Image: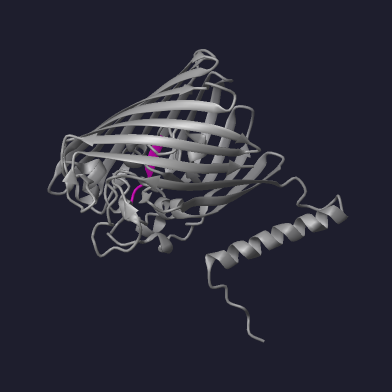
Amino acid sequence: MKAKIIKSTGEVFFILFAMVGSCFAEEAKSTSYPLAGIEINGYFDFYFQASPQAHAPIPATSAGPQVVEGTVFERNINQMTLNVAEISVKKKIGKVSFRADLALGEMVDQLSGGGLQSVTGTNAGQNPTNTAANEPTRNLTQAVLTYTASDRLTLNAGKFYTFMGYETAKAKDNWQYNRSYSYNYGVPFWHEGVNGTYVFTPDKLSSTFYLLNSWDGRISQEQNKAMTLGLNVAYNPTSEISLNLNYIGGAESSDQSRREVSEVTASYNLHPKVTLAADYIYGVQKNIAGVGDVRWTAMDLYLKWAATENYTLSPRIEYFDDSDKGFAVAGGLSGVGLKQRITSVTLANNFSLGDGIEARFELKVDGSDSAGFFKDQNGAGLNHQESYTLALLYAF
């Protein structure tokens, strides 16, 4: 009898869910089943986006829906898109806990280095082809083993989202659905490595040290031969104020030039219904062969107003300066791209529908001091771009 060969990721998920289901069925029969205490969470992200600047993918030979420029996780236009569907499994025994997030969707491709947008900029892949399918852990958005050594010291190993940036990869954890330029182009998305957090003063001061494979954790596109170091210092001087100092630096790209980013984030609870936040980054890649040093900076300002129990209004203002050789947004590994300064204004309307469901309606206006980055319907250069997004989020 021949063994069955698993041919698709979908079959893998079906088998995993069937196994989990059978485990819970057994647990119902015996309260002593060893998998008791497993926590399962889910996340669903679905969106539709429109824009007067919607155009065919570039290069024109690329297949796929119409797109806009400057976005990574929500680039499709005039098409309903499953951004991500994810199941998270958690288990804790004593001082040790384990978490694994299994996901499918467009966001998975972008995190893994695929898609059209990620072939340029600081999150560029090694070559202009979709290599997401080659990433061995592409459907594991996170997999972390945690050891709580004491009340003050926690150690982690595995694959995890980046600590850089005020925003995160999951829209549900952000005030806006669309990610900022500073998140898309200024910092990495995720890592593989180890980290340790030490709490100096509970609820006041802590620090986390990171030892990582590289700028991000995509093994199939790895180019450097040295480790990347990261550091976070979190300080809450009062219950209303939160400050974070972040740093990441290490060799990057085949010529072993060094990439470093320093960041400051701050949030202030002005009122029980109003929160202000800011994010500033400074990035540099040093000693690029034939280019030298390149730099980029970004500044984001946020406001969150809980107007009612079920409605939140959240504007964001962005400024991304990539005028030094255009490395971060359009340069990629070559270090040379379109020199520009980008400004962006986003207005997010978030509606809580109950039972974990959230609807978002968002308006976004982008501008550049160069006419070469944004495109019109025919692919010709523009200095502006507008987009409108409807999103449905669910978490349990």
Residue at image coords 66%, 38%: 355
Segment colored magenta:
225-230
Against 127, is 4 above or below?
below
Question: Can you see residue 296?
Answer: yes
Asked if residue 368 is among those painted magenta in the image, a careful observer would answer no
Question: Can you see residue 164?
Answer: no
- Name the foreground residue: 17 vs 33: 17
Question: Which residue in the rendered view is the most extreme toward the left?
Answer: 290
Residue 89 placed where, x, y %? 64, 49
- Name the foreground residue: 94 vs 273: 273
Is 270 situated left or right of 28 in this image? left
Against 207, is 63 above or below?
below
| Quarter occupied by the N terminus | bottom right
The image quadrant that residue 198 belongs to is top right
The image quadrant that residue 135 belongs to is bottom left
Question: Which residue in the rendered view is the most extreme toward the bottom?
Answer: 1
Q: How is the image coloured?
A: one colour
Is 115 situated left or right of 98 in this image? left
Question: Which residue in the rendered view is the most extreme toward the front?
Answer: 52
| Quarter occupied by the C terminus | top right
Is 258 situated left or right of 10 in this image? left
Against 194, is 79 above or below?
below
The image quadrant that residue 394 belongs to is top right
Residue 285 placed where, x, y %? 24, 40
Q: What is the tally of numbered marks visible in this picture? A: 0
- Name the foreground residue: 260 vs 2: 2
Against 298, is 237 above or below?
above
Residue 184 placed where, x, y %? 35, 41
Is 176 situated left or right of 378 in this image? right
- Name the foreground residue: 286 vs 12: 12
